[in-house]
Amino acid sequence: MNSQENLKTKVAIIGGGPAGLFLSQLLHLHDIESVILERRSREYVLGRIRAGVLEQGTVDLMRRAGIGERIEHEGMIHEGVGIAFENALHHIDLMSLTGGKVVTVYGQTEITQDLYQARDSMDGMIFHEVNEVTLHQLDSAMPYVTFFKDEQSYRIDCDFVAGCDGFHGVSRKSIPQDELTEYHMSYPFGWLGILAETPPVSDEVVYASHERGFSLCSMRNSMLSRYYIQVSLEDQLKDWSDERFWGEFKTRLPAQVSDNLITGSSVEKSIAPLRAFVADNLNYGRLFLAGDAGHIVPPTGAKGLNLAASDVHYLSGALIDYYQSGQEQGLYGYSERALDRIWKSVRFSMWCTLMLHTFSEHTPFERRIQKADLQYLIDSPSAQKMFAENYIGLPY
Ligand code: RFL
Ligand code: PHB
């Protein structure tokens, strides 16, 4: 084997998903060098179909990161969102309820592609398909990271490590157990998502509650639909032919929506379990966690990627302050600041999930409460205002 290759950088970023890429790009624009280590190939990362609904704060962060051009033309502005139950569709007017704020529909794959392109154009250093990433001496002023790529071993000496490696990554696991509290919640179901090259069934994203289970109508563009249905945790992809999916999806939507449904063959299909998780805190010595590495929310409120963006906003600001003026307060206040917003989004995502999904273990009493929750949202301008304020994104 070749001898170890030694590198040096300011911030070693573990994970080349949206959080890691955003962070690297923002630091670069302030002359702060970083290196990204990503376990998967670029094709794999770009092929993962995930988020679609972006808060204004996320779009603003894209602009600040110098990737605001394509979304300007291709992002779809949504002024409202649909909530369906008992065969009726209701409209929540985000724009009027929030004094002019909206969300933008633009796929996570597109953001990741824009970020990789930006990093490439600025000669950003990204190692793909790395393995055995190990973090060392995080509680000292001289942390370092070791890893292998193509059987070559590497060591990166750095000032800080940013753990942006998602829920299953190595960063959080590198924090000693007695320095970390983990809060978990699992839901007894998952989402089966499909991508289909068909015109979207609705101009707006529609969240639909039905006794057979939740469903969601979303989109990526005028010829690409993204749909989800609640499925059992035991279900596997092989149980869900396209034909079965369309039949079930149609049943769960009000006629007003399903009458417009155009079906076709799916180009992607996946199942994801729903869970919530928060790590407290997000900082250990010179390691800072951001994005899914520090927290997971069920996708019902469309908050996961948006939280990764707000974490990066706080963390990049703190690192920039540190390198420009030597100020450390921002860095050591990062976790508390980020967690305040995270817990509010965890709350919103949980409320949406509990209100919209079907829980087989619910008593008749709990079912009536769920219905009252939906009815209250539809009838009360104050409840709608609370929904809209959270959905468009709480302030940073
Ligand atoms: P990611 O995207 O998981 O990226 C982490 C990266 O780290 C790599 N990695 C490692 N690299 C090096 N060494 C290791 N040991 C490593 N271990 C892991 C991984 O390969 C990966 O590339 O986390 P990040 O960057 O924090 O971004 C978070 C978002 O991806 C996530 O929150 C959203 O996708 C959640 N989400 C949604 N968020 C929204 O804001 N709006 C939505 O509409 C929305 N819809 C969704 C979603 C997530 C979904 N799934 C699949 C859970 C819909 C779904 C179905
Ligand atoms: C999506 O478009 O993939 C999407 C939209 C809204 C959500 C979750 C996912 O709440």
Image (cartoon, helix red, strand yellow):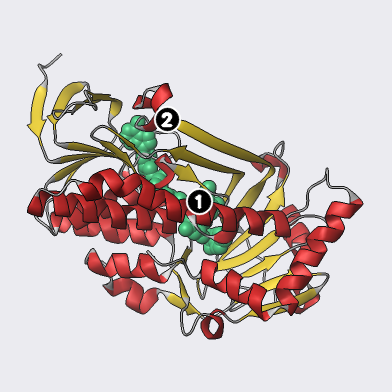
Spatial CA span between label 2 and label 1: 16 Å
x and y, in percent, of residue 319 in the image: 19, 49
Q: Residue furthest front?
A: 329
Q: Residue at x 30, y 58 (%)?
A: 313
Q: Of 249 and 362, which appears nearest the observer?
A: 362
Pointer 2 with pointer 1, Cβ within 8 A = no
Q: Quadrant of the C terminus?
A: bottom left
Say whether residue 111 is visible.
yes
For label 1, the residue is 343
Asked whether, in this view, residue 373 is left or right of residue 184, the answer is right
For label 2, the residue is 180
Asked whether, in this view, residue 368 is left or right of residue 64, the answer is right
x and y, in percent, of residue 349 in the image: 58, 56
Q: Residue at x 42, y 30 (%)?
A: 180
Asked whether, in this view, residue 28 is left or right of residue 379, the answer is left
**Image quadrant in which you'd find residue 382:** bottom right
- The amino acid pointed to by label 1 is Trp
Secondary structure beneath label 2: loop
